[in-house]
Image (cartoon, helix red, strand yellow):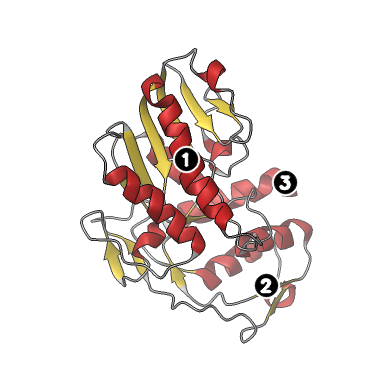
Amino acid sequence: MSNLIIGNTSQLSHYFPLDYVRVSSKEIDFDQIKKTKWEKIFLCFGESRKFIGNSSIYDEVNYSLTLSVIEKLYEYSNYFFVYSTCELWNKYSGQISLDIPFDFYNTSYIESKYKITKHILSSDNYSKVKILYPFNFNSIYRSKDFLFGKIFHSIINEVEIEIGDTYFYRDIIHPKFVVSESINTNEDKIIGSGRLVFIDDFISDLYKHYGLDSKILLKRQKNSFQEYIKREEYYLKSEEYKYSYNELLQDTILDINKIKK
């Protein structure tokens, strides 16, 4: 049976197998989609931009549109996969798992993800729908609204950029790993590495690989970027590292090489 990705311009879409069918979330031809019985439908679209004037857009896309697509196509697929976020546990410090309740510092984005997640989990009508909670992932398809979008732009073009705080730890992964974990499960799942990475070291290692000096190309304004939430150091509960630092580094380098060469 065929598999469908809704959200053909999303970061994740680029890392699924080439034989997966891809369609835009902005112009969904439901009549055409209903002609096929799908094995899995992955809802990869979402609104995650940090700087938008109308915060209701998060709710419109991440909740209303997502729910509408599920309900219109529910009988035409064996499984649906919705991408929520690990940020629903962002008040925790240490290991997180599906066994512990959500507890988070709220934003409009996180609230929209919580709303669709809670709606699905609280109903018996969505047994086919599986929720995936990925940790932070970045690729060359990440926009420059985000830290790593800026970093990749700087490395590829060898130009100076301004950034805020990078002196923190995160369970950070690559979209390639997120897709692999997504394909190989039929259950709700938190997708993470099971370890913390010091973000500043990771960024420095990327610059070093290309013979670039991050101290020269990165203009740091430590006091000009103030987040109103505390950065908790939380990560996937796992008996072993599911995704090593070297894998993260190499997958990111391979990604950058697609453009830099």
Q: Earlier in the sequence, mark 2 or mark 3?
A: 2
- In what element is the residue under mark 3? helix
Secondary-structure class at tag 1: helix
Q: CA gap, disc 2 to disc 3?
A: 19 Å
Find disc 3 in the rendering and name its residue. 259
Q: Amino acid at mark 1?
A: Thr
**Res. 66 mark:** 1
Residue 156 place in picture, x, y as percent: 73, 56
Quarter location, residue 128? top left
Residue 250 lies, with reference to residue 43, above or below; the image says below
Mark 2 secondary-structure assignment: helix
Residue 170, percent from left and from top? 44, 66
Residue type at mark 2: give it.
Ser
On screen, residue 247 above or below 164: above
* Residue found farthest to the bottom: 223
Whole-angstrom CA distance, mark 1 to mark 2, is 40 Å
